[in-house]
Structures are given as structure tokens and as C-alpha cells.
Amino acid sequence: MVATSICGAQQVTAARCVASSAPRRAIVIVRASHQHQQQPASLSRREATAAALAAFVAVSIPAAPARAFLGLGGDGDARYASETAKIIAGMTSALDMAVDDPAREEALKSLRKETVSWVSAYRRDPKYSGRPSYSNLYSAVNALDGQLNSFGFTSKVPAKRLDRILKEVSDADKQLQRGR
């Protein structure tokens, strides 16, 4: 594109027009060059045939369910059942330990890490979070975590709270055995 201005009767550049004593009216004339034209996209017969064949193959092959690869995906129900059973066993064994047992603190710390990963894995999935086994065990995990946050790993769980936690854990185990 070329831009020029007409200042008075002469054709000059815009900078010289402003500096001159001629009237302050400037007209800008723009001429388009033919160098930058877009050409329409053309499609050869070979490309059109290949695209049609690819579309036909994509539509004609039925969709198959995704298979587990390297242990990812797979049967989520079996994974949920095994992880939940592991949490239940860990909670009952950790809560059955004596308060002065030196392994109790380490067992509660590892149990806490497992429960955090268990909750984060299944809380947002309505397929699992709506199950009675999940809600019972989640309530027990929440009660135990509240106890540990408030009083630490070395304190004794009060009898009333311990009974409630163990009842919810046993209810969760029963529901899990029923597949719920």
C-alpha cells in the first residue's frame, strides 16, 4: 500500500504538508497493490478421496470400551473395594493398639496418609460417594482426623468417640461385603 497526501495543488509527503504554509487540509489517497491476493484453497481428487475414506472408516467402526493400560483405569469397583477394605483394616488395627505402644503413632500417621488419598480419590465421584460404605467410612475417618488434629497422635481416643468410630467402621465393612 502506498500513502501520499495532496497539500494544496501539489502532491507531497505528509510531513512536508504539515510543515508548509498551505491550508491545513490534507487528503490521503491509498492505492492497493496486487501482490497480496489470497488464492482460494483447492483440494485435489486424491486428498478428497482420502478424506472421504477416513470419514467412512471412522463412522463404520463401532466404539469399543476403553481397556486398562498399565493398571490405569480398569475395574474401578474392585479397586474401590480393595482400597476401602485396606482402610477399614488399618483403622481397626490402629485403634486397637494400646496408647503407650510405640508403633501406634507411626500406624496412625500412615493411616492418615492413606485416608487422605482414599478420600481424594472417591469424594468427587458420585458412583462411589453415594454408597453407604463410603459415607460410613468417611464419617469414621472424619471423626478420627478431628481427634488427631485436636489432640495429636499420642493421645487416647475417648471411649464414646472410639465406640462410634468402630461402629461406623464395622457398618462400612458390612456394606462393603454386600457390594454397597
Image: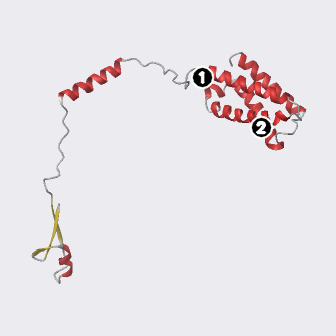
Amino acid at pointer 2: Asp
Horizontal placement of 77 versus 166: left or right? left
The quadrant holding residue 147 is top right
Amino acid at pointer 1: Gly
Determine the CA span between mark 2 and mark 1: 26 Å
Few, some or many residues within 10 Å of mark 2 (<14, 14–19, 20+): some
For the C terminus, which image quadrant? top right
Q: Position of residue 72 (x, y in %)?
A: 55, 26
Residue 132 visible? The answer is no
For the N terminus, which image quadrant? bottom left
The residue carrying mark 2 is: 145
Residue at position x 66%, y 34% in the image: 117
The residue carrying mark 1 is: 76
Few, some or many residues within 10 Å of mark 1 (<14, 14–19, 20+): few
Q: Position of residue 46 (x, y in %)?
A: 20, 27
Q: Position of residue 39 (x, y in %)?
A: 17, 43
Residue at position x 76%, y 18% in the image: 174
| Residue situated furthest top in the rendering | 178
